[in-house]
Amino acid sequence: MKKFFLAITAVVLSISSFAYDPVNEKLIRSFEFNFPNASQVSWQEVEGGFIVSFVKEGVRARASFDAEGNLLRVIRYYEEQQLPYEIQYRVKRMFPKKQIFGVIEVTSTKNAKDVYTEYMIKLEDSKSWTTVRVTESGKVSVTEKFSKN
């Protein structure tokens, strides 16, 4: 019985060592090229590709890749200090009584020449939360507003 148990254990261990890993070398190279020195890297397979969660220079981020290793989208989550100055300036001028609470930066890539970035910025004051979208061209629009109760 002991030999049987050892044989089964050996078979299970050998099968698990050949387990399918969908994250191939091409994907890893593409990720490392686009995000050198990223830490806390975690891969997730989704329909049509992969999502990689990671931290780079203290900023949490998620990147979407197709199965060929092409970067499709990057979403970064950060605070006011990392927001580009021209975006900060525009938002603070339009909403002078509100504080910037947090930023979600979304960069979409169709190809190397067609890259588009927009910002979803959460603002707050003593009475409400407001989310504004700032496009790459500088257009600012309110997407949601909630009262604090």
Image (tube, rainbow, N blue to C red):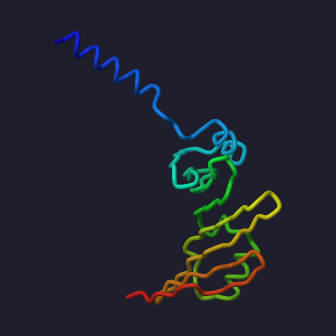
Residue for point 76% across, 80% down: 138
Q: Position of residue 142 (x, y in %)?
A: 60, 87
Pick the residue in front: 133 or 69.
69
Nearer-the-camera pick, 67 or 71: 67
Residue under the point 54% across and 40% down: 22
Position of 21 with respect to 2 (left or right) is right
Please identify the quadrant where the N terminus is shown.
top left
Placement of the C terminus among the 4 image quadrants: bottom left
The x, y position of residue 147, in whole percent, is 44, 89
Q: Is residue 111 above or below residue 14?
A: below
* Residue 118 position within the rendered picture, expressed as x and y whole percent measured from the top left: 68, 72
Q: Quadrant of residue 133?
A: bottom right
Q: State the residue in front, 91 or 13.
A: 13
- For residue 128, above or below residue 106: below
Residue toward you, 115 or 138:
115
Picture residue at 58% right of the left edge, 44% below the top: 39
Total labels drawn: 0
* In this picture, residue 84 sits left or right of residue 55: right
Query: Of all residues shown, which one is farthest toward the right?
Result: 113
Relative to 90, say whether 32 is above or below. Answer: above
Residue at far top of view: 3
Task: Write down the quadrant of residue 5 in the picture.
Answer: top left
Looking at the picture, how far across and down is residue 104, in whole percent? 60, 68
Instruction: Name the residue at 46% across, 87% down.
Output: 146
